[in-house]
Image: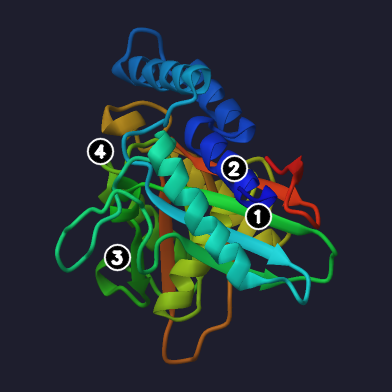
Amino acid sequence: MTDLQDSLLELIRRTSAEVPEDVHQAIVAALEREKQGTIAQSAMEIIEQNIQLARRKSQPLCQDTGSVLFYVEAPAGFDQLAFEAAAREAVTLATKKGFLRQNSVDSLTGVNDGTNAGPGAPTVHFHQHAAPEVSVRLMLKGGGCENVGAQYSLPQEKLKAYRDLDGCRRVILDAVLQAQGKGCGPGILGVCIGGDRATGYEFSKQQLLRQLGDRNSDLRLDALEQDILQTANALGIGPMGFGGQTTLLGVKACAVNRVPASFFVSISYMCWAFRRQGVTLDGTGQITKWLY
């Protein structure tokens, strides 16, 4: 096994079994907010027990280990083909070891070959940067939370959502309402305002790579993020839709350019089992730093 493949295998293991610290802190804070003796408190306690058990036994947090999404930032000249080959081998080995469940199937036949590797799986996004090091972020996104993602084309007359920030706010909150009881809440939203149908969803997923505690550098988007978080948590939907004060753990938003004829708002929903981790690699592929 190469150093790169070995590092990617460890990245997969840790991502699958351990909620990152920023997410864990948000879950603990949410547990403390819920009223004693409520179903919401019970749900959050079970979530916390699940987190501790998965970490201690180094087993997947959820039976759906999800789509395997790599985000790679690398300098010019980086061998993308070698990385993709190492990633596929690491995913296959991680599946054999039980770090990933066998849940990637052929879309035409439904056949599961047990490797989690195939057309589009795993997915690798490459971005070139000026720094000398290579950073790799991994997201394991389950099907339940992926199913409640949403995309709106403004204006939406029924929601009185027009082509402005208030219109964006209205459709984002509508997505939260539509997702209640589904998607394994409390959830985290990644939002993209603008783009086309494909890039809107892609940029919205990239927002989920941010730390939960960070603040948006764009004051307008920062205000939108905080407003959506507070408003959603006042709706009473709560964990798993059981009622309570914790519907969302975080909201992260960006805005990208669009053509005048289109105004899309794309929302990617992440479940409480927020499997997101990252590493910095040296020239041999060995891990030098954990990013979350």
Left or right: 2 in relation to 23: right
Residue drawn at x 58%, y 82% is 257
Q: Are marks 3 and 4 in contact (CB under 8 Å)?
A: no
In the rendered image, which residue does mark 4 sit on? 181
Please rate how many residues cluster around mark 4, counting C-alpha atoms within 10 Å: few if below 14, some from 14 to 19, many from 20.
some
* Separation of residues labelled 2 and 1 (CA atoms): 9 Å
Dot 1: element: strand
Q: Is residue 92 visible?
A: yes
Report x, y in % for residue 114: 29, 48
Camera-side mark, 3 or 4: 4
Q: Nearer the viewer, residue 21 or 227?
A: 21
In the rendered image, which residue does mark 1 sit on? 136
In the rendered image, which residue does mark 3 sit on? 159
Q: Amino acid at mark 1?
A: Val
Q: Are marks 2 and 1 in contact (CB under 8 Å)?
A: yes
* Separation of residues labelled 4 and 1 (CA atoms): 33 Å
Dot 2: element: helix
Q: Amino acid at mark 4?
A: Gly
In the rendered image, which residue does mark 2 sit on? 11
Report x, y in % for residue 271: 40, 41
Quarter of the rendering containing residue 132: bottom right
* Separation of residues labelled 4 and 2 (CA atoms): 31 Å
